[in-house]
Image (cartoon, coloured by chain):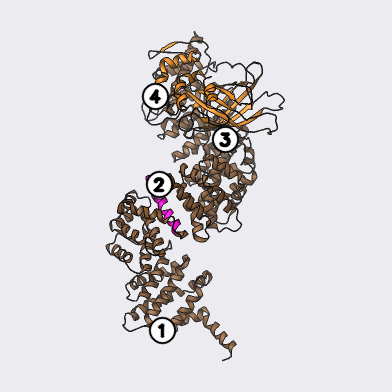
Chain colours: A brown, B orange
Amino acid sequence: MPSTAAAAAAAAANQPDELIRRLRSGDGAVKLKALRELKNQIIGNRTKKLSYIKLGTVADVVGVLASSVSIDSDPGSGSGSSLIVESAAIIGSFACGVDAGVKAVLEAGAFPHLFRILSNPNEKVVDTTARSLRMIFQSRLAPKYDFSKNENADCLISLLNSDNENVTGLGASIITHSCKTIADQKILSSAGVLRRLITLLNGSLYQREASLEALTAMLSSNSAVISNFVDLDNGRALSSLINLMEDKSPRTRLLASTCLIVIGRTCSSYLQDIELKNKLILILVELLEEPDRVGDEVPFALAKLIVDREDLQRLAFEANALDKLCNFLQRETLQPKRFEGLLLAIAELCSRLESCRSKFFSLKVLNLVTNSLKHDAADVRTVACICLRNVTRSVKKLSAGYFMNEMVVDPLIQLLHDSSNSVQVAALSVISNIVVDFANRKSIFLRCGGIKELVRLSQSMDPTLRLNAVLALKNFVFLADNSSKECVLAELTVSTLVSLICDPEPKVQEQALAFVRNILESGIDSIKPVFTEDGIIINAVGRQVRNALDLNVCLEGIYALGNVATGNELHKEAVMHQILEPQVNGPSQSVLMKFLQGNNSQLRVGAIWCIINLTYPDGPGTSSRIARLRDGGVICQLKKLADDPCLDAKFRVKTALVQCVNNNSCAK
Amino acid sequence: MPVRIAESSSCSTPSQGILKFEILGWHLVSESSEMELIARNLSISDSLTCANSGDTLPPACTLLSIGQAFSGSQNVSSLQKDEAWKVNVRIQGCDLDHGYLCGTMEALNVPFADTPVVTFWEGEIVDTKNYTFFTGKWEATIEDDIRHWSKFPSFSPLLNEVKDNGGRSLNLSNYPYIFMRWKEQYFVNVGVDCGLTIAGFYYVCFSVSDGSIDGFYYDPNSSPFQKLELKSTNEGKSGFSFSSYQLQ
């Protein structure tokens, strides 16, 4: 045959249709050859994998595997083993890194066949099958292995006790994938799995890393199992782990560090030693340089380590972690995963320490983070918002009006329409901070249409969106000028505000009342709008103050009423009516007396401020109000608070009583 | 900004002189004899030692909360009493856990300035946890610290403890005064070439009782003991209002 014709024939044989036809052949040798060709085509080739998955090839391969298992049970059949090895390897390859592949493999029923093959006497067969199963278990789509079934637990132990490193690795992978609950961790710990995993730490690189991942799953958030682990062999297990943080394999260093982070997050006493904390941070910072998977995962590990831990954030900052992270962020080609991790680690570093935020601004990456609000990946957009949220916690920068500009505000407002709910919530959290703006540049936000969007989301069916939108509105009207406040009220409408004050969620009620409080802060002109439509706003506020069970709702409500009481006579009388009226279905005492007699010092102080404003000197109705407060037992109660253990309450009581006494003196 | 002002303005509460009346068996007196009240009824020594366990942070005070305003003056020179700048202060941030307070300071009649000069300042609250009475920076020696703190009458009961270790062992959670250092960080509305300096910082004493603030500006290169005197203000309203924001 001429050579060109031979090449054409070979190419035709490699065509998918032809290959599938040969897979279905009754001839074992033809099948085996087709399997090898298929394996070579799909290894490392995602596109090919997806195209064969679409053609239903996975089911054919699983079919070959199933039939080969029965052939292989016939002693003396050599071809059966080869077919198993090839088909199992292909199944693993389809499952490797492709969710659709895992789904197809599971739907084709490969799982039970593969598990059965693990007891095959042929070492190579077992080796390949274990590797394929491990690939499946690396996917989140793999079914959860039920450790509570005795036979499953026994099977797992036998896997971990195997001499074959791929089989022990499979056992560890099953734990990593399926050990998710306290109950799972307890079962495995009781079954002696910890000790076996620690032994595997001394095995091959593959076993060591699989074991570290499994240990992390077993120890996560479980102080009892952590305690068992630390006590094993007089603490040698923990020492081994710490030693592995300096292993020559970067991945081992990362996994050992991650395991220690999990231990330290749950039981901080094991991560107290300053040297150990420093070492952990330095290792992670160094690992940021690593390429590929390790480099992708390190920022997440660093973020997990320092979240809510100011001491560790400070150490990481001193180890120049922020400089490095920002430096990486500025590299041109970053995969979304790496980008997300870097943003998250920066966000955590800047979550509490102003020194970190200052450094962040000096490193000139704000624009880069702002630009990533438009990233294609929703996870990146979310984390970019979280990063911005944390850096905008800087009152120093807010005071300078640093963030209130179209370049930052516009993309954030657009994210309020994002298809991802978590992006919307994260964007709201940044907006909440930015609109605090002390530099009188709030009109920029109004001009960009931000208020319209916040009002829209304040009526969302999703309580989280509603809560965050109302919180942002509250922050916007904080120390805003009256014209800005009027714009917000006009957009929100009185009826919507009333429904938010009476929202089913107490947290929304609290924020709505705090919004009202801020609206009312700037004197008579700011109070008047609250008295429109027959005073339904102040009535709603009063109802909540009298009836709410939530402390914060009462607190915001009483301060809102206190602010109303800084207005004119009409306003003060309205407050008198609200706070002296007996509570519905409650005792006959007024809510004012209830707060003054209560245990909560903040509520007492809020109530006393209300009285101070109601008895403020020189008002034509002040004497009458003092008389009514006296009749209601309020003045008598104030005297009882003259030695209040809360200094703020004690001194405010003094002011109130002085005002009352002075008024009486003047009246006489 | 070497801001200072001459005479203190009048008290925000209406009563002047001593006002006495019986409340639960002890005498309540107005602010003009405030120290007397504290000495007799609050007992400074008790207030310093009664809370050895638990929270030792200074008392939260609504008059020193976010959004609150103060007005008064700063004398530029202790010799020329008439040379005084009107000063307005607004609290913009407060984080008691970290002993942090911040806000703006507006000087109104600064010579040669076309507009009021606004600066942003950050405060360290002396809570003996985050900060002690010893400054340890900004060119302030321990002697400078003691000399300035001693200008506040309310500091005298603390002096001996402070001399030992900056007052680290003191518990100020029930003390009716809050001591702070305010350091201006930047000019908000004018450039750095405005001819003013913010190189120094203020030793500040806030009275929980009436919300008044006294301060002394310290800058080795400026005239000493420029006095800041501020009163809590309701900005012309018929009472005191309170607003809030919440950073996420």
The circle on residue B49 is 4
Mark 1 Cα-neighbour bin, 10 Å: few <14, some 14–19, many ≥20: some
Q: Which one is nearer the viewer's eye here, B245 or A120?
A: A120
Report which residue position mark 2 lands on.
Answer: A271
- A267 drawn magenta: yes
Name the chief secondary structure element in magenta: helix
Does label 2 lie on the same chain as label 1? yes
Chain ID at mark 2: A
Q: Horizontal placement of A615 versus B184: left or right?
A: left
How busy is the neighbourhood of tag 4: few (under 14 within 10 Å), some, or many (20 plus)? some
Q: Quadrant of the N terminus of chain A?
A: bottom right
Q: Are marks 1 and 3 in contact (CB under 8 Å)?
A: no
CA gap, disc 4 and disc 1? 90 Å
Q: Is residue A318 left or right of residue A265?
A: right
Q: Which amino acid, mark 2?
A: Leu
Mark pair 3, 2: CA separation? 44 Å
Residue type indicated by callout 3: Val
Above/below status of A433 relative to A46: above
For disc 3, the marked residue is A477
Q: Which mark is residue A470?
A: none
Front in this rendered view, residue B78 or A397? B78
